[in-house]
Image: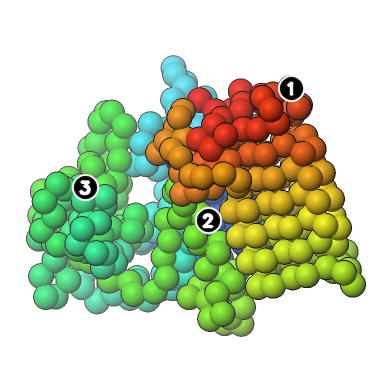
Amino acid sequence: MIKKEMIAMLLAGGQGSRLGVLTSKVAKPAVAFGGKYRIIDFPLSNCINSGIDTVGVLTQYQPLRLNTHIGIGIPWDLDKNIGGVSVLPPYEKVGKTEWYTGTANAVYQNLAYMESFNPEYVLILSGDHIYKMDYEVMLDFHKAHGADVSIAVMSVPMEEASRFGIVVADENGKIQEFQEKPEEPKSNLASMGIYIFTWKALKEALVTLRDQSNCDFGKHVIPYCHKKGQTLVAYEYNGYWKDVGTLGSYWEANMELIDIIPEFNLYEEFWKIYTKNDILPPQFVSEKAVTERCLIGDGSEIYGSVYNSIIGCGVIIEEGAVVRDSIIMQNTVIKQGAVVNKAIIAEGSVIGEGAELGAFEEVPNRRKPSVYAFGLAVVGENTVIPSHVKIGKNTAVTGITVPEDYPDGILKSGGTLDKAGDIQ
């Protein structure tokens, strides 16, 4: 019988609605990051760098691009005969078909997959965080404490603690109390959504809670294990970790890659980040081009000026175009004389000649002020912006737009233009 010491279950089914139009056609873990990667590359790379060769990826929302990206796991050396990477969408069962209704429910629906490897430990991961972590070190900690459940935690400012699941632990790391997004937190140790369970404890909890609606690890499984008197410990992590759940945090995490000394280093030999690489020619920067502090992906052609920006693969920036403080995803074209200031432009878009993004004073977005914020202009994938229009800050534009969509050639700050039906 197959026996694996530890397998990983990677939750990658989330919509990521706070990323707005960036996730209208693609699951959040498949959103581009850092010019050449996708968000899911980071936990997958952590697994293989930590010696974990069996990973179940649980998908649900808009899974096509994620499935294509993962394939059979070749970039991460996860194309194994036994184990490797398996994409696990919801599937039809005798009697009824169930969507995944919560993080724990998704894992429960794949008990048979986990049982087939007879694991001693199961690692639960989220597919939408940017970080490097050696899960083997966390497993050693788990074993040393004789724990049933280990929760990775990190210190956060006390004023932000109410946004997280908070653990209260003693000096030995044993968890005394667990608070889910408390109004008055008793500690600043925030759960990172990374758990190691002994297989026995996980299976027992999932089977017992199987009828719990929207069964979730933070809200249901962890409190259940704690109530049962099981040993729960907090594994404190002190490295870089970023939840890129909002447009602002996504933009910031990308921009941190081009700091003079980046806090998150993509270039470390001993901890590589792997991804599916398309076969592309080298980047080309013309004699007249200006590039300052930027990442430029393979196959891109730069004829204009780029400052402090992340440029994906296969992007064309024409002569006279200026890009500042922006994220331009793959296969986008910025036409001659266009000006792009603090924008996120999704894959396959075209910005017309002389168009300007990020113009005017900043005002809140009128339709979704909590999503389209941070002073950003956001353009959905395969969008066309016509020539010589001006688009303000805290805006969202999707679809093939034409000059008539812009009164006086303007989309004011806080405006939304949705020709693709992507802004719910």
Residue 293 appears in the figure: yes
**In the rendering, at what x and y percent does residue 30 appear?**
59, 48
Label 2 belongs to which residue? 251
Query: Considering the numbered disc 3 on the image, is that residue within a helix, a strand or a loop?
Result: loop
SS class, disc 2? helix
**In-image side of 298 versus 215 (left or right):** right
Which of the two marks, 3 or 2, is nearer to us in this view? 2
Q: Quadrant of residue 119?
A: bottom left
Mark number displayed over residue 89: none
> In the rendered image, which quarter is residue 254 located in?
bottom right
Three-letter residue code for mark 1: Glu
Question: Residue at the spot x=25%, y=31% of the render?
Answer: 212
Nearer to me, 36 or 11: 36
Kindly indicate whether the residue at mark 2 contacts the one at mark 1 (C-beta within 8 angstroms). no
Alpha carbon distance from label 3 to label 2: 25 Å
Residue carrying label 3: 181
Horizontal side of 357 relative to 166 (left or right) equals right
The CA distance from mark 1 to mark 3 is 46 Å
Asked whether 124 or 339 is in front, the reply is 339
Q: Residue at x 11, y 51 (%)?
A: 184
Residue bearing the label numbered 1: 404
Residue type at the position of mark 3: Lys
Mark 1: few/some/many CA within 10 Å (<14, 14-19, 20+): few
Image position, residue 160 (x, y; %): 25, 56
